[in-house]
Image (cartoon, rainbow, N blue to C red):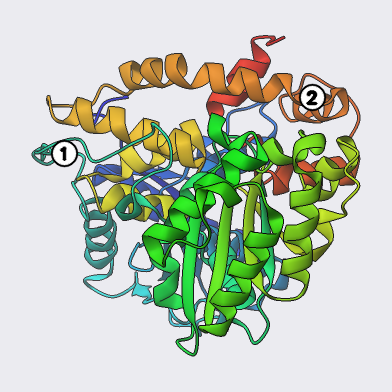
Amino acid sequence: MTTSQKLHLIFICYAKEDIEAVKELHKKLKQAGFNPWLDQIDILGGQNQNFVIRQTMKSTDFALICLSQASVRKRGYLNKEIKWALDRQDEMLEGDIFLIPVKLEECDLPDRISVFQYVDLFASDGFERLARAMKHQSGQAIDSDSEIIMPSGPNPFYYGGAVPTQLFCGRKEVLQAITARIGGPALQSVSIVGERRMGKSSLLVYVKNELVKRLPQNHNYLIIYIDLMKGFCHTRKGLMHALRRELTKAWREPWSKDGDGDLEVFDFAVEDLQDENIRLILCLDEVENLTKRPGEFDDLLEDLRANGQMGQIGMITASAQPLADLCNEHKLSSPFFNIFSQNWLGLLKADEWKSLVKNNMPVNQDDLLFIAEMVGGHPLFTQIAAFHLWEIKAKGAVDYDHLKSLLKQEITPHLKYLWQKLSSCEKMALRYYTGKSVGVPPRIILNQLSRRGILGKNQLFCQLFTELINEGVK
């Protein structure tokens, strides 16, 4: 596949009563240089019709909803074809064109798609209007057949750790939950749970730098971010030294150096902040580093829980496992987890990662489709894909085979690590979706995998992971 060769796939939805008119539309689209797909023409003899249709739906660039007086009266037709097209449209940016109602004759437009501008195919300029709409969408960034626009300046994409604030995207629901807990009448705490490299650190850094702009202004907020992976945070004294340093930068020195490790001086500092109407928010990244050292941090965790329970501080923790599991696994005496609301961090939504890519690099629909298939909205993998795509575009035309080879080399170690951490039941469930296992997996396992961003809509989250499993990863 190259930028000059790939044609956008056009899926034609219709009722069987309109097959002759739809075949004529298919013919005209072919003659005009488009790539239409019609089941009556494009499914080969002996192929599983339902399977081929589902696979084509996943990769199509446009959905033409062909309407007539007969089709708008068909309940099954509307529920199946239109629902699928609307679901796909929801994954795109607001200005994107995907679903196009095409009237084969004068008829009413179904309410569910009445917000989309229709095309009267029977009008004298009907086909030209249809073609213009699809060409417009194909050329929103760069048309496949047009001159290639090369990016300039330094590569903006980044995947060395927490992304800079300007590259943070999405997470609207989680940010709303954090805002409600931190900015509500009573200060509360939030636990963020997600797989490794799912963007937890990026979220906490964004919260530290930007959350104040979202919060009610009836309080002052002091938000501190602490990376608990750092070696100096592996003892209570070291952690309190780091906390004292950050408080001194943002407020004033809360206690002397001799007080590092003394929980009493910390509690007094919290009370002083309250007296000044300042809400202290602690963003604790990699909180596993506290729970796995119960002998060192049990008392501190209990003190943090007590302050949090009384609304004297708010905490936002990030971990790969739920706090309750961590506390139970490491046999903490403190039920630290029981003051937190829990929010899972999964894959980015389509409009979220597309905005990230489009806002930082000239792209076309082929580029976006490639990224969607290869990395499926994974935050780290999207940054990696966009980084290499930017580098290739800066040199000229895009060779997608070469780009895939680069991504496979760089992303495969992450996928192998993810695979090794899965349970045998989870691995069996994923093999089911590659055809390597028999028996439908339990619903509870599928829900867990979906929540964690490992399983998409009835498929693995990205093509690279599917291929790795099919190759027999151990």
Please state the horizontal and vertical placement of residue 342, each as a whole percent of the image. Answer: 73, 59
Q: State the residue at coordinates (54%, 75%).
A: 273
Which percent across, then down, holds residue 314? 63, 67
Q: Quadrant of the N terminus?
A: top left
Q: Which mark is residue 65?
A: none
Of labels 1 and 2, earlier in sequence is 1
- Left or right, residue 378 beside residue 194: left
Q: Is residue 59 left or right of residue 71?
A: left
Give percent across and percent down for residue 301: 76, 51
Kind of residue at disc 2: Lys
**Residue assigned mark 1:** 145
**Front in this rendered view, residue 294 or 143:** 294
> Measured along the vertical axis of the image, is residue 9 above or below residue 140?
above
**Between 409 and 431, the one nearer to me in the picture:** 409
Say left or right for 64 vs 309.
left
Residue 394 image position (x, y, % from top left): 13, 30
**Residue in front for this viewpoint, 120 or 322:** 322
The structure residue drawn at horizontal position 53% and vertical position 46%, both measured from the top left corner, is 241
Above or below — where is 368 with respect to 234?
Answer: below
Q: Is residue 103 visible?
A: no
For mark 1, give the secondary structure: loop
**Nearer mark to the viewer, of 1 and 2:** 2
Q: Which residue is mark 2?
A: 427
Location of the C terminus (image quadrant): top right
On the question of residue 143 being in view, the answer is yes
